[in-house]
């Protein structure tokens, strides 16, 4: 009877809202369609289906939700105090309603019709519906969907299950999801050990995590904490003489190891799943969670730690990024995109696109030139001043050259002979660069300026390091991957499906490897030379005034690429000719 009455009230309210809308979607034109849609959503994607994505490396496991760590409670382990606090401040009638509170909805609807400020009115179940199935868009369409999903959830789950799901998914600022991780992060204890002052403090945050961030705006948090304590007194959970004791949350320390690598791994898994199934990335992300995907990676934690520490030691304001790839497995063994240990940061290794300078020459200029002309490193090029299509580059220090060997042109990174070589193999160079899929390459980059790395938008450290794997694979290129495999709960195992392409011949590749070795033995990379290595080679790259400092090196079968600079390009004159990037690379790859 209660459900039938509730549906009649809900139907009437829904029709009233529908008549006030003009933007409602076609599939949501009738209340009946709405009910079917909501039931389908909660049936297809039950609350219990939202599983962690597990990233594995070196027989270790890290569980992630939406790329972030979450420690979930169960209905059995949910502390009664936590439940009481959320009910007091968020939804007094939580135990009586069927997912919606008519009084609250009408108050919010009336308020929203009368002015431009949006009013609340959502029950805990509605908030859970929004967190799990919807977005935060402020439209009546979303509000109707939220309400109907809440009704469907109430029919499928107990109040205890709904409350547990709510406190597990609630956001507590600073990349913290769930009350359990919030308790451990801010107070260094599990939720079951929290006192009332700590519980009321944490319960204040989810209502507006930006405004009530306890690390940035603790005074705001304390004001809402006081309101929660008053609500608990009102509900007779606490006595009138209760006094909030002083609490000081500690600075959040991340629980995700190697966050820059793992952030990039989760994004790579989403893209791989989307591509292999023809889905959107949003759908792929949902599928990975629903299936409790286990992502096996190539991470070498020792190399990752060395790279992170090396970048941390860089003098401010120099930032950096590093990518390590195993040339035999094509697996990404390390990826560092920022100095901090927080998740969700701007990841320079995969998100920063910068001009590569001369580090692009072996790929765009010398490989295609040697392939077309069958020249050798001992062959010579004219290094005298040159202008092509109005482009007149000079050599470092404005050095004037005559005839130079290709070996020296590569080793010393001369510009004028490189431009002349590119003029001979221009079309071949553009063709050879295509398989590397530099994502920001545009038609404007099909120009002579690109021979020296003068690209419009640039290349990411991951893309450039990935391209250099061609030198350890006999002129064949297969994109590197962070992922060995993805195992789904249904038993399906998916692996990267990358095809191998020949870029140039074995002979050309041998010449290029010898040229890259010269860079290390007597050229611009000599400060990174290691005589104990079976093979060592690489190429430096800098842009004007040392705004970007690149080095991609090969040591035995391992490729490591590094970029140093600033997010807002600025000169680093103190690093001129110091090859800081080469020395940093050598530190990372030194056993």
Image: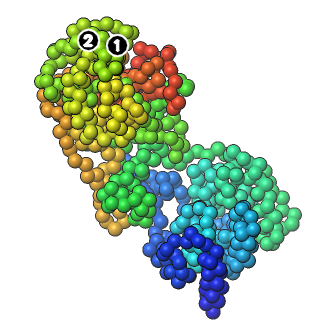
Which residue is pictured at 50% across the width and 27% down the height?
Answer: 569
Which residue is pictured at 81% across the width and 72% down the height?
Answer: 236
Q: Is residue 72 visible?
A: yes
Q: Are marks 1 and 2 in contact (CB under 8 Å)?
A: yes
Sort mark 1 into few (<14), some (14-19) or many (20+) by Cα contacts within 10 Å.
some
- List the single residue furthest toward the front: 389
Residue 15's x, y, as percent? 62, 81
Q: Is residue 232 left or right of residue 436?
A: right
Name the residue carrying label 1.
395
68 or 462: nearer the viewer: 462
Residue 91's x, y, as percent? 70, 71
Sort mark 2 into few (<14), some (14-19) or many (20+) by Cα contacts within 10 Å.
many
464 or 189: nearer the viewer: 464
Residue 259's x, y, as percent? 48, 44
Q: Where residue 383 is drawn, which disc sits there? A: 2
- Quadrant location of residue 98? bottom right
- List the single residue furthest toward the right: 241
């Amino acid at each position: 009877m209660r459900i039938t009455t509730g549906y009649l009230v809900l139907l009437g309210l829904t029709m009233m809202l529908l008549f006030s809308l003009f933007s409602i979607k076609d599939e949501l034109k009738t209340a009946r369609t709405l009910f079917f849609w909501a039931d389908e959503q909660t049936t297809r994607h039950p609350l219990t289906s939202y599983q962690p994505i597990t990233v594995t490396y070196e027989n270790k496991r890290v569980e992630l939700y939406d790329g972030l760590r979450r420690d979930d409670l169960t209905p059995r382990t949910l502390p009664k105090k936590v439940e009481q606090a959320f009910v007091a401040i968020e939804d007094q009638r939580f135990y009586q309603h069927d997912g919606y509170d008519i009084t609250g909805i009408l108050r919010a609807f009336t308020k929203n019709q009368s002015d431009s400020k949006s009013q609340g009115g959502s029950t805990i179940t509605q908030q859970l519906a929004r967190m799990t199935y919807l977005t935060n868009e402020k439209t009546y369409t979303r509000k109707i969907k939220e309400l109907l999903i809440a009704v469907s959830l109430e029919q499928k789950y107990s109040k205890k299950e709904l409350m547990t799901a709510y406190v597990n998914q609630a956001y507590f600022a600073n990349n913290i999801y769930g009350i359990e991780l919030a308790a451990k992060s801010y107070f260094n204890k599990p939720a079951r050990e929290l006192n009332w002052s700590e519980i009321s403090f944490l319960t204040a945050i989810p209502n507006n995590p930006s405004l009530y961030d306890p690390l940035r705006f603790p005074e705001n948090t304390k004001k809402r904490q006081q309101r929660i304590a008053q609500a608990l007194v009102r509900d007779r959970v606490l006595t009138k003489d209760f006094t909030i004791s002083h609490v000081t949350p500690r600075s959040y320390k991340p629980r995700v190891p190697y966050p820059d690598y793992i952030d990039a791994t989760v994004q790579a898994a989403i893209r791989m799943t989307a591509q292999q199934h023809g889905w959107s990335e949003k759908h792929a992300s949902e599928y990975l969670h629903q299936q409790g995907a286990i992502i096996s990676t190539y991470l070498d934690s020792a190399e990752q730690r060395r790279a992170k520490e090396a970048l941390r030691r860089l003098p401010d304001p120099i930032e950096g990024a590093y990518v390590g790839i195993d040339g035999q497995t094509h697996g990404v063994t390390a990826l560092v995109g920022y100095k901090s240990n927080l998740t969700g940061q701007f990841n320079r290794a995969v998100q920063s696109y910068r001009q590569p300078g001369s580090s692009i020459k072996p790929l765009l200029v010398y490989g295609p030139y040697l392939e077309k002309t069958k020249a050798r490193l001992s062959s010579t090029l004219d290094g005298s001043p040159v202008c092509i299509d109005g482009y007149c580059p000079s050599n470092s220090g404005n050095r004037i050259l005559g005839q130079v060997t290709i070996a020296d042109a590569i080793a010393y990174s001369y510009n004028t002979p490189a431009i002349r070589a590119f003029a001979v193999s221009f079309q071949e160079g553009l063709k050879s660069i295509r398989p590397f899929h530099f994502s920001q390459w545009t038609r404007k980059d099909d120009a002579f300026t690109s021979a020296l790395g003068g690209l419009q938008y640039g290349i990411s450290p991951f893309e450039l390091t990935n391209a250099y794997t061609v030198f350890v694979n006999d002129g064949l290129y297969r994109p590197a991957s962070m992922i060995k495999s993805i195992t789904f709960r249904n038993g399906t195992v998916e692996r990267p499906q990358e095809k191998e392409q020949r870029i140039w011949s074995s002979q050309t590749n041998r010449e290029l490897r010898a040229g890259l070795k010269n860079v290390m033995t007597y050229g611009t990379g000599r400060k990174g030379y290691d005589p104990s290595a079976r093979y060592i080679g690489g190429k430096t790259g800098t842009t004007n005034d040392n705004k970007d400092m690149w080095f991609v090196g090969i040591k035995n079968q391992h490729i490591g690429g590094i970029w140093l600079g600033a997010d807002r390009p600025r000169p680093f004159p103190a690093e001129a000719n110091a090859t800081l990037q080469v020395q940093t690379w050598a530190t990372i790859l030194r056993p």
